[in-house]
Image: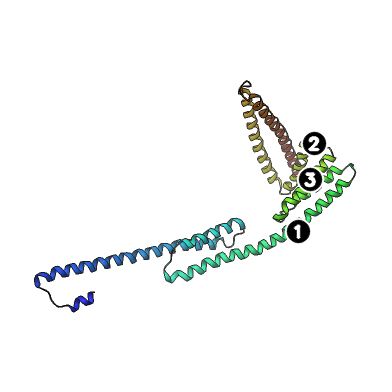
Amino acid sequence: IQARWKTIGYVRRSDNEKIYERFRAACDEYFNKKTAFFKGKREELAANYRKKLAMVEEAEALQESSEWKETAARLAQLQKDWKTIGAVPHKYSDEIWKRFTTACDAFFKRKKTEQGDARSEERENLKSKKSIIAELEALDAEEVAEGIVDKLNALMAKWNAVGFVPFRDKDAINKTYRKLIDGLYDKLNIERSNRRLEGYNASLEQIEGGGRGQLFDERDRMNRILDRMRNELQTYTNNLGFLNVASKNGNSLMREMERKQEKLQEDIRLMVEKIKLIDNKIREADSKD
C-alpha cells in the first residue's frame, strides 16, 4: 500500500497534508503494534527458556539419584510440565531439549539396571523365606521339647532379617508364615500377649544389629506410643465417669467403652514389657562394650 501511495500523483494543496497525516497515522499504528507484538513474543520465548533451563538443571541434578521412586515421580512430572511450556528461542531449542532428555534417560537407564538387580535380590529373598517356612513346618512336626521355643524365636528372627520379596508373592507367603506361627503358638500354649512379646523380641534382634543408637531410637518411639495410649486410656476413663447409664443406649455404649478400656490396658501392659526388653538389650550392649 505504501508503494502504491508513492505512484499516485499530487492532490490539492489544501487536502495533501491532511490526507497524508491520516495515512501515516494508520501505518504507524500498525507498525507500533507489530513491534509490541514481537517484543512480547521475544519476552515470552525468553521466559519459556528460563523455565525450561531451570527444569533441565533440576533433571541434571537428579540424574544420579538413588531415590528411585521419588526421583522417577519427579522426573515424570517435569516431563509432563515441559509439554505445557511453549517454544523457546530457536537458537536454544535443540540444545536445551537434548540436555533435558539426556538427563532423564540417564536416570531411567540406571533405575532399570538397579531395579533389575533388586528383583533378582527379591527372588533370592523369596527362596530364603520359603526355606524358613520349611524349617517351621519341620519344627511344627516335632514333639514339644526343651529348646523348641528358642528354635522358634531363632526362625522368627531369621525371617525378620530377610528383605523384600516380589510383590505378587508377598501376601501368600506372609499368610503361610503367620498360619504356621499361630499354629506353633497354639501348640506351645503361648498366650496372646506372650506371642506378641515373643514376636517383638525376635524383631529386636534385627534392630540390635544396627547398634545401640537404633535401640535408643526404638525405645523413644515406643515411649511416644505408650504416652499416646495412656492419654487415650485417660480419655476413656473420663468419658466413662461422665456417661449417663440411664440415657438411651447408655448400657451398650458403656460396655463398648469398657471393652476398649480393657484392651488399652492390656496393650499398655504389653508396651511396658516391650520397653523392658529394649532396656535389657541396651544393658547387654553396654556390658559388651
Query: What residue is drawn where x is 76% and y is 46%?
Result: 205
Of callouts 3 and 2, the N-terminal one:
3
Q: Residue furthest bottom?
A: 7
x, y (%) of residue 171? 72, 50
Q: Quadrant of residue 87?
A: bottom left
Q: Is residue 97 visible?
A: yes
Q: Quadrant of residue 34?
A: bottom left
Quadrant (top left, top right, bottom left, bottom right) of the N terminus: bottom left
Crowding at dot 2, Cα within 10 Å, few <14 / some 14-19 / many 20+, comes out as: few
Q: Quadrant of residue 169?
A: bottom right
Crowding at dot 1, Cα within 10 Å, few <14 / some 14-19 / many 20+, comes out as: some
Q: Are marks 3 and 2 in contact (CB under 8 Å)?
A: no
Looking at the picture, which amino acid does disc 2 mark? Glu
Residue underneath mark 1: 124
| Residue 54 appears left or right of 181 | left
Looking at the picture, which amino acid does disc 1 mark? Glu
Q: Nearer the viewer, mark 1 or mark 3?
A: 3
Q: Which mark is residue 19?
A: none
| Residue 77 appears left or right of 42 | right
* Helix, strand or loop under label 3: helix
* Helix, strand or loop under label 2: loop
Residue underneath mark 3: 179
Q: Is residue 197 above or below residue 237?
A: below
x, y (%) of residue 138? 86, 49
Quadrant (top left, top right, bottom left, bottom right) of the C terminus: top right
Q: Which mark is residue 191?
A: 2
Marks 3 and 2, how far apart at CA: 16 Å
x, y (%) of residue 119? 70, 60
| Residue 134 appears left or right of 169 | right
